[in-house]
Image (tube, helix red, strand yellow):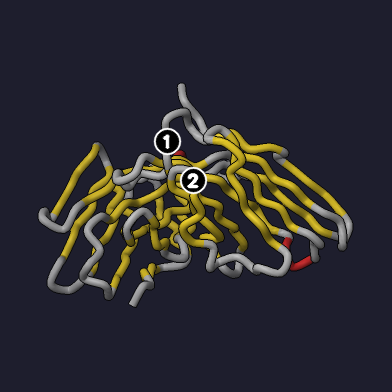
């Protein structure tokens, strides 16, 4: 049963600390998406990759957020420095372009104190 | 023009009733309209999807109705069950990306 995995599942940190979230997409999928979910904003697309190349990161605050795919089995989302307003659930999703279905991971719940 | 507007924000339905969630879009270039279901503590999961060349798609108790001329589509859940209690998101594609609605929290009471 192929699934998207994300680590950590929960993260509590203090303001100013670096946070790294990891995602393992489904093997063979060539698109990876990072979303942020909050009660106020719903699901926001932060960035996405196709064949490991970043195609759109316009949803990301560039000064503190960065997203990378070091290889086809790992995507990372970093926040440095973290701020309380970054508290949210961060989801990774993968898919097979040009098909449209996205498969979501279980999310990383981030709390910045 | 890239937005997908979803309503209502929350919905309470009695067991056995019909749940209806509505979405509207502006961009006529959208050609794929999925609905995702999200349970608390989980990621969204694809529930059912439709393309604009058909007006209705049914899978079990879940039906999408699509009105291309009105640029609207809706999810109908027949014989709603307490296990259907979740947040539902409509979406529309923009190339590889999906534009999500704001979500509807459905509660089905016994």
Q: Chain of mark 1?
A: A
**Location of residue B88 by image quarter:** bottom left
In this rendered view, identify the residue nearer to me: B4 or B14: B4
Labels 2 and 1 within one chain: yes
Closer to the camera in the image, A44 or A53: A53
Above or below, A49 against A30 in this view is below
Dot 1 crowding, Cα within 10 Å, few <14, some 14–19, many 20+:
some
Q: Residue furthest top?
A: A1
Q: Is residue A6 left or right of residue B44?
A: right
How far from the left and from the top, in percent, is residue B54?
11, 53
Quickly name the residue at label 2: A32
| Relative side of A51 to B62, left or right | right
SS at mark 2 in the image? strand
Residue A109, x across and y down, in percent: 70, 48
* Badge number at residue A29: 1
| Residue plotted at (35% across, 45% down) | B80
Are circles 2 and 1 on residues that touch, CB within 8 Å? yes
> Residue shown at 86%/56% (left/top)?
A17
Element class at badge 1: loop
Q: Chain of mark 2?
A: A
| Distance of label 2 from label 1 (alpha carbons) | 8 Å
Please identify the quadrant where the N terminus of chain B is shown: bottom left
Disc on res. A42:
none
Residue at coordinates 42% horizontally, 40% vertically from top-left? Answer: A30
Q: Is residue A3 above or below residue B50?
A: above
Q: Can see residue B84?
A: no
Residue drawn 89% across the image and 57% down it = A14
Task: Indicate the position of residue A55 as horizontal and vertical percent values.
Answer: 46, 57
Q: Nearer the viewer, residue B79 or B43?
A: B43
Q: Position of residue B94 (x, y in %)?
A: 33, 61
């Amino acid at each position: 049963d192929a699934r998207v995995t994300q680590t950590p599942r929960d993260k509590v940190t203090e303001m100013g600390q670096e946070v790294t979230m990891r995602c393992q997409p489904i093997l063979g999928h060539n698109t990876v998406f990072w979303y942020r979910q909050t009660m106020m904003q719903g699901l926001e697309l932060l960035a996405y990759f196709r064949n490991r190349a970043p195609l759109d990161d316009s949803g990301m605050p560039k000064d503190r957020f960065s997203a990378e795919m070091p290889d086809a089995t790992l995507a990372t989302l970093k926040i440095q420095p973290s701020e309380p307003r970054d508290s949210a659930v961060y989801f990774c999703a993968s898919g097979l372009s040009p098909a449209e279905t996205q498969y979501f991971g279980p999310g990383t719940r981030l709390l910045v104190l | 023009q890239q937005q997908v507007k979803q309503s209502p924000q929350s919905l309470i339905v009695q067991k056995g009733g019909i749940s209806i969630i509505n979405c509207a879009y502006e961009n006529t270039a959208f050609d794929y309209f999925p609905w995702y279901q999200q349970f608390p503590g989980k990621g969204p999961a694809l529930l059912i999807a439709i393309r604009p060349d058909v007006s209705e798609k049914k899978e079990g108790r879940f039906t999408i109705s699509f009105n291309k001329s009105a640029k609207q589509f809706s999810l109908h859940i027949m014989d709603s069950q307490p296990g259907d209690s979740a947040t539902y998101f409509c979406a529309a594609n923009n190339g590889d990306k999906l534009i999500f609605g704001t979500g509807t929290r459905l509660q089905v009471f016994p």
